[in-house]
Amino acid sequence: MSRDPAVAIVAVAPLWLVYEGLRLELAPSERNGAEAFVTDSVAAFGSRSLLVLEVLLGACVLLAVVAVLRRKLPWLRIAGVVAIEGTVLGFLLGPLSELLTFTLIETGALGPMALRAGVSAQELVGALGAGLFEEAVFRLLLLSLLALAFTRAANAFALPRSAGVAAAVFVAAIVFSWFHHVGAVAEEFRFPVFAFRAIAGVVLGAIFVLRGFAVVVYAHAAYDVHYYLVHE
């Protein structure tokens, strides 16, 4: 059920509203890199293009709500389960990815851990924005397009479709990690960090394929909050 497009949109909508509200109230200047990429790209088409995008997004949410209500689905329960599942997976994502990174390249990718009392407003807004926009760009859009292309290629070479999906997950994860090291506010490239993000991208891609967009959005957001809580 979590992989149903209408259910996914309805489940993610509350997080999106919380993000927009917190960003406007607590950190108006905070903007995730993937969000900036999308909005700047759309804005290049004209002054009203962002308004058109917002209207389209609003229409998608409305259509999803109508679809869920028409089928009489227990949307509130489903959204709650999706949020809980994603949060649990998000708190497991960091330790798992760090363990895999350390196993592969024998280094501490993210430095020492230090439990903190909480997260700042900017960090919280950034975590929610990363979950929403990075997953929309790198999993919902990029991974889906790659999976479509690679599964067709797999069929042409008489390979199982799962090989095409696995290749799509891997390539999307590499692009996802690389994205953090380009642009005006790019991080300095360090291979352990790049490898960690790529591995995390593979795990997030697997969650997207197996559990759907809504679960991976909550997982990514929860992971980022967890990261800010346990790293200096």
Image (cartoon, helix red, strand yellow):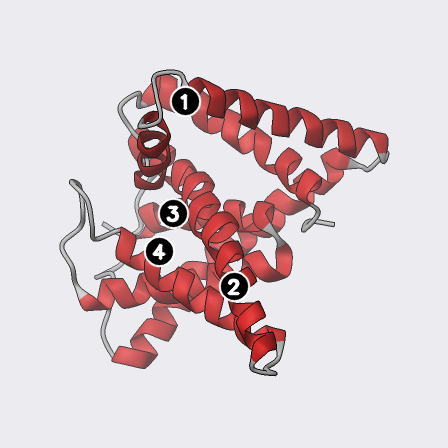
What is the C-alpha distance between the residues marked 3 and 4? Answer: 15 Å
Q: Nearer the viewer, mark 4 or mark 1?
A: 1
Secondary element at image label 4: helix
Q: Nearer the viewer, residue 136 or 196?
A: 136
The relative height of residue 222 versus residue 76 in the rendered view (above or below) is below
Secondary element at image label 2: helix
Mark 2 and mark 3 lie on one chain; the one further toward the N terminus is 2
Residue at the far front in the pictured view: 156
x and y, in percent, of residue 232 in the image? 22, 49
Amino acid of disc 3 = Asp
x and y, in percent, of residue 192 in the image? 23, 68
Q: Nearer the viewer, mark 1 or mark 3?
A: 1
- Callout 3: few (<14), some (14-19), or many (20+) C-alpha neighbours within 10 Å? many
Amino acid of disc 2 = Ala
Q: Nearer the viewer, mark 2 or mark 1?
A: 2
Residue at position x 16%, y 59% from top?
189
Left or right: 50 in relation to 13? left
Residue at position x 48%, y 44% from top?
136
Question: Residue 224 bears which disc, if any?
Answer: 3
In the picture of the structure, the residue carrying the numbered disc 2 is 149
Amino acid of disc 4 = Phe
What is the C-alpha distance between the residues marked 1 and 3? Answer: 27 Å
Q: Nearer the viewer, residue 211 or 230?
A: 211
Marks 3 and 4: CB-CB under 8 Å? no
Q: Nearer the viewer, mark 2 or mark 3?
A: 2
In the picture of the structure, the residue carrying the numbered disc 1 is 50
Is there any visible trace of residue 111 in the rendered image?
A: yes
Secondary element at image label 3: helix
Marks 2 and 3: CB-CB under 8 Å? no
In the picture of the structure, the residue carrying the numbered disc 4 is 176
